[in-house]
Image: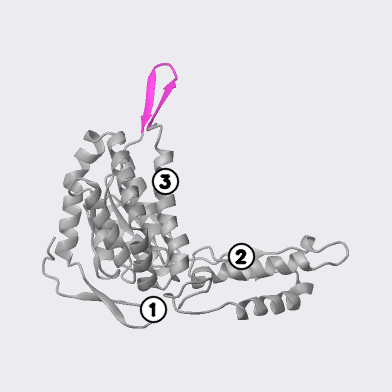
């Protein structure tokens, strides 16, 4: 819909070339309110009148559209956040389709009710929480969007998605696919903008939102929690961390053979370099026995120096810009 009062735009920059590739309109506070009201209006019908089989049918249709446009999606992510195009095709796009496939599999039996025989008919019925605000990061755009949006839609939530301002283009294409798949109006809504004092804060504090799911920095996660607290909405946070890669000396052969130890260090460096190190579970802390510290340092340095850096537009097994 047309923005209500906002003329501000986000400049989307290609990290490889440093040039502007798009401008995206920033949502105003009125835009956010309209999106939440649309989600609230659609929730009852989507959650209680639309059977799970229909919701799964729509997600299956969405998956088909996603796979049909996989190259376009890969190109958008490569240009907006710098994932090398080969990796974007194989990992970035694939993570989104994998999430959709898995959630379709998990909801195949449609078992949202548990019954107990404890002296009478007792049942626990799992119902959707309501309107979910979903705030996603830029480093794995479709992985994070699919991991949040798809399960919410399948269980009957309506959603308002705010993708990262660094990577909004892939989310916009995803929104177009949602529309083309035939989801009812108001079930999926998307607003673009920033976090503090903008769309992210307005969503997390909005009284019409029942839950906020956020993935991003620890600083921003604290602010989301603080904004959500006055309305006592449910909050789910996945924030920054550092993955430890621990290598013990039992990988060293009885004869002192260091080949397995060396391979473990090298693989750790390669895993840390994946996606230019911009992954939440990248093993960027390497812990080794002190007596092997210098050897591990030398191997890790050589592996890092051997890592090729090139444009994200180039085919190949290299890393792109940070």
* Element marked by disc 2: strand
Magenta stretch: dominant secondary structure: strand
Foreground mark, 1 or 2, reads 1
- Lower position in the chain sequence, tag 3 or tag 2: 3
- Disc 1 and disc 2 in contact, CB within 8 angstroms: no
Q: Is residue 12 above or below residue 66?
A: below
Q: Residue 300 at what x, y percent from top left?
A: 66, 75
314 sits left or right of 9 in the view: right
Label at residue 244:
2
Q: Position of residue 160 (x, y in %)?
A: 26, 55
* Comparing labels 3 and 2, the label whose residue is closer to the camera: 3
Which residues lie in the magenta part? Answer: 112-125
Cα–Cα gap, marks 1 and 2: 28 Å
Category of crowding for the residue at label 1, using alpha-carbon neighbours closer than 10 angstroms: few (below 14), some (14–19), many (at least 20)? some
Which residue was labeled with disc 3? 101
Q: Say which residue label 1 marks.
A: 15
The N terminus, quarter of image: bottom left
Between marks 3 and 2, how big is the CA–CA gap? Answer: 30 Å
Near mark 2 (Cα within 10 A), the count class, few <14, some 14-19 or many ≥20, is some
Residue 273 in which image quadrant? bottom right
Check disc 3 and report its element: helix, strand or loop.
Answer: helix
């Amino acid at each position: 819909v047309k923005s209500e009062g906002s003329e501000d735009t986000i400049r989307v920059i290609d990290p490889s070339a440093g040039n502007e590739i798009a401008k995206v309109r920033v949502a105003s506070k009125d835009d956010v309110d309209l999106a939440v009201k649309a989600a609230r209006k659609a929730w009852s019908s989507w959650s209680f009148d639309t059977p799970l089989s229909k919701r799964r049918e729509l997600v299956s249709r969405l998956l088909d559209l996603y796979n049909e446009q996989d190259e376009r999606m890969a190109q958008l992510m490569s240009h907006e956040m710098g994932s090398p195009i080969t990796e974007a095709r194989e990992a970035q796009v694939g993570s989104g389709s994998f999430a959709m496939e898995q959630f379709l599999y998990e909801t195949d039996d449609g078992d949202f009710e548990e019954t107990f025989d404890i002296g009478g008919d007792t049942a626990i019925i799992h119902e959707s929480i309501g309107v979910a605000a979903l705030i996603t990061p830029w480093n794995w755009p479709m992985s994070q969007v699919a991991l949040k949006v798809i399960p919410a839609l399948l269980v009957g939530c309506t959603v308002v998605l705010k993708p990262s301002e660094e990577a909004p283009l892939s989310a916009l294409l995803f929104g177009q696919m949602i529309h083309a798949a035939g989801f009812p109006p108001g079930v999926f809504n998307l607003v673009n903008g920033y976090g503090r004092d903008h769309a992210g804060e307005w969503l997390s504090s909005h009284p019409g939102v029942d839950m906020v799911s956020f993935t991003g920095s620890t600083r921003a996660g604290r602010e989301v929690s603080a904004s959500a607290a006055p309305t006592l909405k449910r909050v789910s946070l996945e924030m920054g961390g550092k993955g430890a890669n621990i290598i013990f000396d039992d990988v060293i052969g009885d004869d002192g053979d260091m080949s397995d130890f060396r391979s473990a260090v090298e693989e750790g460096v390669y895993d840390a370099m994946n996606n230019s190190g911009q992954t939440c579970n990248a093993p960027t802390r390497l812990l080794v026995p002190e007596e092997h510290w210098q050897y591990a340092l030398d191997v890790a340095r050589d592996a890092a120096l051997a890592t090729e850096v090139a444009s994200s537009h180039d085919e190949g097994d290299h890393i792109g810009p940070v």
